[in-house]
Amino acid sequence: MGLTFDYIGLLEPTSPFVYYQYLQEAVEKLDSQADADAIVAVRESTPHPFFVQDDHIFLDKISENISHLHFMGRQHFKKQITPSGGFYIARTQAFMKARTFYTAATMSFLLPFECELEIDQERDWLWAEFLCEKKIIQQHKIFSNESAI
């Protein structure tokens, strides 16, 4: 074919609510950062990893962490992020070399709440239907760049 592309991307069908606008913004952010290889959609990690441990009979790790809190509320914790599955975009050359979207030069793109939903279970589907019914997810923004009405 002889075609070359600047970027390669992955959109997962289990994350169908990423607005077109954010895909454009992500490409622009990646394009403006010459030393970046890729950009990946992320969301705020909840609960905070401070309150998470491996499955165990006793909450030993969580108890130890809480003992060091000294009455600090959760809202004072530094924001933690985790990949959301919303999208993965990489410079084609960087992707071909690394064979992954994740390198030390991968940037994050924080998605808003209504765009971060992953549908992996029936309850996720029901939650998505509720968010669509309440117009929290604005379906017209998924495939077009029009602003909210």
Image (spheres, rainbow, N blue to C red):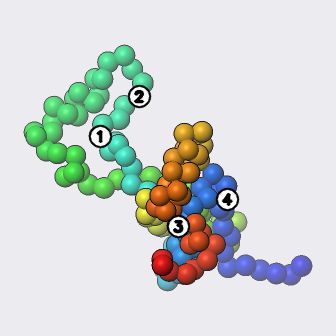
**Residue labelled with disc 1:** 50
Residue at point 26% right, 54% down?
A: 78
| Circle 3 or circle 2, nearest the eye | 3
**Which residue in the protein does label 2 denote?**
54
Residue pointed to by mark 4: 99
Residue furthest toward the front? 133
Q: Report the side of 15 relative to 83 (left or right).
A: right
* Label 1 residue SS: helix
Quarter of the picture containing the N terminus is bottom right
**Who comes first in sequence, dot 1 or dot 4?**
1
> 10 Å neighbourhood of mark 3: few (<14), some, or many (≥20)?
some
Residue that sits furthest to the left in the current view: 70
Location of mark 3 (residue): 138
SS at circle 4: loop
Q: Amino acid at mark 4?
A: Arg
Report whether residue 74 is seen. Answer: yes
Q: Are marks 4 and 3 in contact (CB under 8 Å)?
A: no
If you read the primary sequence from the N terminus, does the residue marked by circle 4 or circle 3 appear first?
Answer: 4
Q: Residue at x 35, y 35 (%)?
A: 52
Q: Residue 116 location in percent, x, y?
A: 49, 57
Q: Nearer the viewer, residue 120 or 66?
A: 120
How far is mark 1 from mark 3, CA to CA?
Answer: 33 Å
Query: What residue type is disc 3 on?
Result: Gln
**138 up-or-down from 132: above or below:** below
Say whether marks 3 and 2 touch (CB < 8 Å): no
Looking at marks 2 and 4 on the same chain, the residue that comes earlier in the sequence is marked by: 2
What's the distance in space between the residues labelled 3 and 2, CA to CA? Answer: 37 Å
Image location of residue 108, percent across then percent down:
46, 65
Disc 1/disc 4 C-alpha distance (Å): 32 Å
The answer to whether residue 104 is seen in the rendering is: no
Looking at marks 1 and 3 on the same chain, the residue that comes earlier in the sequence is marked by 1
